[in-house]
Amino acid sequence: MSTADIEKTIGDYIIADSLQGNGDGFNYDVDLLAVAVIDSVSLVQLVVFLETTFQIEIDPGDLNPSNLRTVNAISDMVRRLLSKEMTT
């Protein structure tokens, strides 16, 4: 799966789940934490979505603001975990 595909999958999920389908003005660099797009409940839902969709395991240590701040940051974490899964 390409970087663009991962970003689109994550972005589409966030728009559908957290923004109720209204993606006007949304881009992959929006600070999801600062604008309260992701709260504690949606964070748990996002983690479940990522683990299920990409067949990865997200460790508690990966759940930090730098990995979850933007779609691009989430995508980077997913790509890193995917490559880790492939080498184990």
Image (cartoon, grey):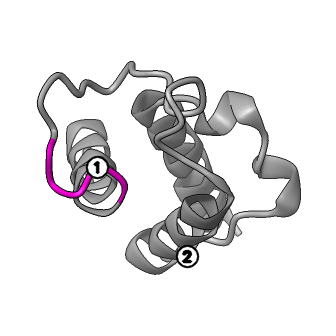
Residue 17 lies, with reference to residue 75, above or below; the image says below
User: Which residue is nearer to you in this view: 48 or 2?
Assistant: 48
**Residue in the image at 46% along x and 41% along y:** 37
Give me the disc on residue 48: 2
Residue 10 lies, with reference to residue 76, above or below; the image says below
User: Which residue is label 1 attached to?
Assistant: 19
Query: Could you tell whether 6 is left or right of 39 in the image?
Result: left
Q: Position of residue 56 (x, y in %)?
A: 58, 70
Report helix, strand or loop for mark 1.
loop
Amino acid type indicated by mark 1: Leu
The quarter of the picture where the C terminus appears is bottom right
| Quarter of image, res 34 | top right
| Quarter of image, res 24 | top left
Q: Position of residue 30 (x, y in %)?
A: 40, 21
**CA distance for labels 2 and 1:** 18 Å
What residue range appears in magenta?
A: 18-22
The quarter of the picture where the N terminus appears is bottom left
Q: Position of residue 19 (x, y in %)?
A: 28, 49
